[in-house]
Amino acid sequence: MRAVVQRAKNAKVEVGGRTTGEISHGLLIFLGVGEGDAEKDCEYLANKISNLRIFPDAKDLMNLSLIDVGGAALVVSQFTLWGDCRKGRRPSFTRAARPERARDLYEHFIGLLRDNGIQVATGEFQEMMDVHLVNDGPVTLLIDSSKTF
């Protein structure tokens, strides 16, 4: 399972001109589910992201987590995080999970964030979305449950 995590001053997702999720302070999380991913991958990422110390403290050092600052998360499904661009000019998505399995793990991940006390907003799974973000920092991190990067 892969995530692109961006610290956000505010972020929102629209589907067909309708806002489906919006946060004012916290993290925008693009989540990609791979073919071999399981609940343990959700647990790893949800705990890592919830407790990642990437928010500034009183000395402006990155020492506080999403939980510490009472921030929210906007979670957007993004199978293209599994796009393999090593050959040719068109990405291959063969390593992305099938939609049915990806949806289950996406929803499990969201539930785990909520279990950690985080307010969660979402996009809509398998829809074309417009994502708006004011990146704070900017701070953008890549996290992989297989720890390949």
Image (tube, rainbow, N blue to C red):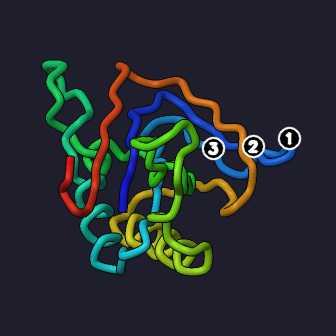
**Label 3 environment density (alpha carbons within 10 Å; few <14, some 14–19, many ≥20):** many
Foreground residue among 134 and 76:
76
Q: Residue at x 36, y 74 (%)?
A: 37
Give the number of the mark in front: 3 or 1. Answer: 1
Q: Could you say whether the residue bearing mark 1 is in a helix, strand or loop?
A: loop
- Residues under numbered marks 1 and 2 in contact, where contact means CB atoms less than 8 Å apart: yes
Tell me if 13 is positioned left or right of 79 in this view. Answer: right
Label 3, label 2: how far apart the Cα atoms are:
9 Å
- The earlier-in-sequence mark between 3 and 2 is 2
Q: Which residue is mark 2?
A: 14
Give the number of the mark in front: 3 or 2. Answer: 2
**Label 2 environment density (alpha carbons within 10 Å; few <14, some 14–19, many ≥20):** some
The answer to whether residue 8 is above or below residue 27 is above
Q: Could you say whether the residue bearing mark 3 is in a helix, strand or loop?
A: strand
Q: Which residue is mark 1?
A: 17
Q: Position of residue 92 (x, y in %)?
A: 52, 53
Residue 146 seen in this snapshot: yes
